[in-house]
Amino acid sequence: MKAEFDICIIGAGMAGATIAAYLAPKGIRIALIDQCFKEKKRIVGELLQPGAVASLKEMQLGHLLEGFDGQAVEGYALLHGDQKTTIPYPLPHKGMGLHNGLFLQNIRASALQNNTVTQVHGKALQLLENDRHEIIGVNYREEHTSEIKSIYAPLTITSDGFFSNFRESLSNNEKSVTSYFIGVILKDCDMPFPKHGHVFLSGPTPFICYPISSTEVRLLVDYPGDQLPRKALLQKHLDSNVTPFIPASMLKSYQQAMDVGGFKVMPNHYMAAKPIIRKGAVMLGDALNMRHPLTGGGLTAVFSDIQILSKHLLAMPDFSNIDLIHTKIEAYYRDRQHANANLNILANALYGVMSNNLLKAAVFNYLRCGGANAQESISILAGLNRNNYALIKQFFCLAFYGAYDLVRESITNVPKAIKILIDALIIIRPLAKNELSVGTVVSGYFKK
Ligand SMILES: Cc1cc2nc3c(=O)[nH]c(=O)nc-3n(C[C@H](O)[C@H](O)[C@H](O)COP(=O)(O)OP(=O)(O)OC[C@H]3O[C@@H](n4cnc5c(N)ncnc54)[C@H](O)[C@@H]3O)c2cc1C
């Protein structure tokens, strides 16, 4: 079958639209399929860490961050009781807070302006295979006619987000819900530290906020557990575990938002990448890999994956050699595992730390000391430092610092100090095993 396209991309979300915007100007023929091209109002992907901004700029896509009132973010503020501290991002790097829906429409418009991109309105239904079990395209239901149609391409990218329909045939992933985020918009809100992401540690579970426009701040409140909370429970959680800890300067806009209500709630997943490599298809974005959004690492991982996959694809003369595409997909899965391990481990480790009273106090005191340790920690969070050793070192330094602090306070704290170290180990061990172990990539259809 002679394919009309080089790549069929399922899902024009953050991952699919961005890789289309990057590859299309290079002459690659793309079919970009999505069930909805309208602007979405979502609470996801609103804080870009400096690593994500840097990746976009390296792909010459930095201009996509312009024109919709996005706000520069210069570092993090931590608030614990009546104590506060800030940690700047390493200069000259900055992050950005924005409306994800507006940003995505910018990316899509940039992709669709290329005559090498064909926009397909429809819901992808099923991957198409030949008799050698190679994937050769996808079936979809066209939006306007409801007809079932097919797209053929030597490479299909499945980037259909966290409820992906195609994971089953392309991975061995196990998805779990760690907690939920309740999203609230605060209008005309005075954050204690303008141009900073804020992490509030005073309540029993963490909540965070950051600017998403010149007049709006996004507040994301964690709701622990793997069951979608009922409305009454959400309100109770906000009333008892958040409202008492909102700083005075933010209280007016917070209370206004509470009066308006209508909060969005999203599940926070953890899913290590366990791809099964099959000829003709590759996974990108949340379809492949997810981590807790507390650290805002999702888009750093997505854009980094796009850079890695594109580098391998662009090294081919064209898309005519299926075996060569296959070796490039293998190389992508191998390289991306190392590149994203820190983001994935940190996101869920920090969530574990912030849900543990002893470790939470330890992380605050450790980072408040500033200096080289705080700088190295923030560069890992920013997605600028991908060194796995640096992450593990910082994690255990903070645990030992917390243990030492407790014992220094009183020798009777020795059991608590031991508990801190054990808890730290319990948090980091499964994550490191999942993310750092070699051989998670399985090659070949029959090894599933
Ligand atoms: C609560 C929350 C907050 C977050 N906050 C941040 C943050 O601040 N910073 C950050 O970097 N990351 C954040 N993330 C993570 C980040 O949003 C995701 O990693 C990112 O959006 C993933 O992009 P994607 O393209 O894989 O999925 P999506 O952006 O969800 O795109 C998937 C696309 O596929 C389409 N689609 C799905 N199924 C089909 C089908 N069958 N046929 C056709 N089209 C289909 C959908 O319509 C959609 O357009 C957050 C995540 C959550 C849950």
Image (cartoon, rainbow, N blue to C red):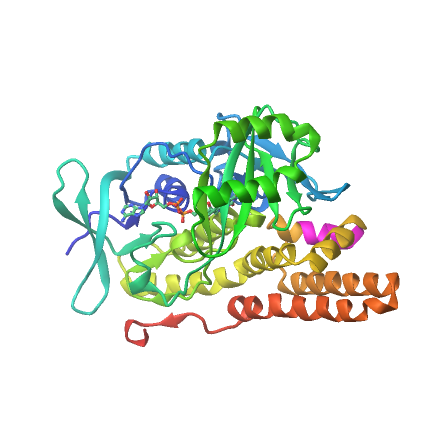
Residue 374 in magenta stretch: yes
Image quarter of the N terminus: bottom left
Q: Main secondary structure of the magenta part?
A: helix
Quadrant of the frame with the C terminus: bottom left
Q: Nearer the viewer, residue 436 or 419?
A: 419
Residue toward you, 235 or 209: 235
Q: Position of residue 113 (x, y in %)?
A: 33, 31
Q: Residue, x 27% and y 41% (percent of image)?
A: 35
374 lies above or below 215: below
Q: Is residue 334 visible?
A: yes
Does residue 132 appear left or right of residue 89 in this picture? left
Q: Is residue 12 or residue 61 the one in the foreground?
A: 12
How far across and down, in percent of the image, does residue 402 sit? 77, 61
The quarter holding residue 173 reads: bottom left
The residue under the point 67% across, 47% down is 201
Q: Is residue 22 magenta?
A: no
User: In terms of image quadrants, where is residue 420?
Assistant: bottom right
The x, y position of residue 9, in whole percent, is: 30, 48
Total marks in image = 0
In the displayed structure, 101 sits above or below 437; it is above
Q: Residue at x 77, y 54 (%)?
A: 366
Q: Is residue 82 left or right of residue 378?
A: right
- For the record, the magenta segment spans 371-378
Residue 3 image point, x, y percent? 19, 51
**The quadrant where residue 352 appears:** bottom right
View extreme (bottom): residue? 447
